[in-house]
Image (spheres, helix red, strand yellow):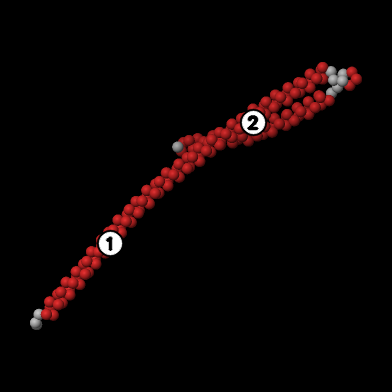
């Protein structure tokens, strides 16, 4: 059980830099997409045809920018999916860690209850021994008093 806990910790340490670099990579991809979008807008405004109209070449260039934007969007989606997978894996390991901690706590509680029960039994047996001692002491005291009284009475009645 400790091995899985340790393994989860090691994987978390390994994926921590990956997640940070994944975030940076995602920011970079979004920046690149923003640049592509600006270039597409510039391409969209180009009109090299007669009388200020758009030519087939202008539209083809605009479509090529849209294709580049779609490819960049696909890269961003893949990056997001990878980050989600890393996060899901981390959550799974954290869940396992908490499960392990809870199981360990339950085991400790059971051990403590057993120890408490043993102590209670020892206390009860100690009380029984104490009561037995108290009763024997009382019986000894009373019998000594009775025997002393009888001896005293017997001695005072005899002529002397």
Q: Residue at x 42, y 44 (%)?
A: 107
Would residue 146 be found to the left or right of residue 120 on screen? left
Disc 1 secondary structure class: helix
* Mark nearer the N terminus (2 vs 1): 2
Q: Which labelled disc corresponds to residue 80?
A: 2
Residue 97 position within the rendered picture, expressed as x and y whole percent measured from the top left: 50, 39
Looking at the figure, which quarter contains the C terminus? bottom left
Q: Position of residue 134 (x, y in %)?
A: 26, 64
Work out whether 50 lies above or below 89: above
Name the residue located 64 percent from the left edge and 31 percent from the top edge.
80
Spot the residue most to the bottom: 160
Residue 149 in the image, given as x and y percentages of width and height: 17, 75
Q: Nearer the viewer, residue 39 or 147?
A: 147
Tag on residue 131? 1
Q: Which mark is residue 145?
A: none
Residue at the image point whose x is 45% and y is 43% from the top: 104
On screen, 56 above or below 82? above
In the drawing, does residue 58 fall left or right of residue 151? right
Image location (x, y in percent) of residue 122: 32, 54
Please state if 31 lies on the left or on the right of 78 as rendered.
right
**Residue 14 visible (yes or no):** no
Quick one: label 2, few (<14), some, or many (20+) residues within 10 Å?
A: some
The residue that appears at 36% across and 51% down in the rendered structure is 117
Closer to us: 145 or 25: 145
Q: Residues within 10 Å of mark 1 (few under 14, many from 20)?
A: few
Identify the image quadrant of residue 67: top right
Q: CA distance from mark 2 to mark 1?
A: 75 Å
Residue 107 visible: yes
């Amino acid at each position: 059980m400790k091995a899985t806990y340790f393994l989860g910790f090691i994987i978390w340490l390994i994926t921590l830099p990956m997640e940070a670099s994944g975030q940076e990579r995602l920011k970079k991809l979004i920046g690149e997409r923003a640049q592509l979008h600006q270039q597409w807008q510039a391409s969209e405004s180009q009109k090299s045809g007669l009388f200020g109209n758009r030519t087939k070449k202008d539209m083809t260039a605009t479509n090529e920018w849209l294709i580049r934007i779609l490819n960049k969007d696909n890269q961003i989606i893949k990056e997001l999916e990878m980050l989600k997978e890393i996060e899901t894996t981390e959550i799974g390991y954290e869940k396992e860690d908490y499960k392990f901690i809870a199981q360990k706590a339950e085991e400790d509680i059971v051990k403590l209850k057993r120890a408490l029960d043993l102590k209670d039994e020892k206390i009860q047996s100690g009380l029984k021994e104490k009561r037995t001692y108290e009763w024997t002491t009382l019986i000894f005291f009373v019998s000594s008093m009775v025997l002393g009284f009888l001896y005293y009475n017997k001695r005072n009645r005899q002529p002397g």
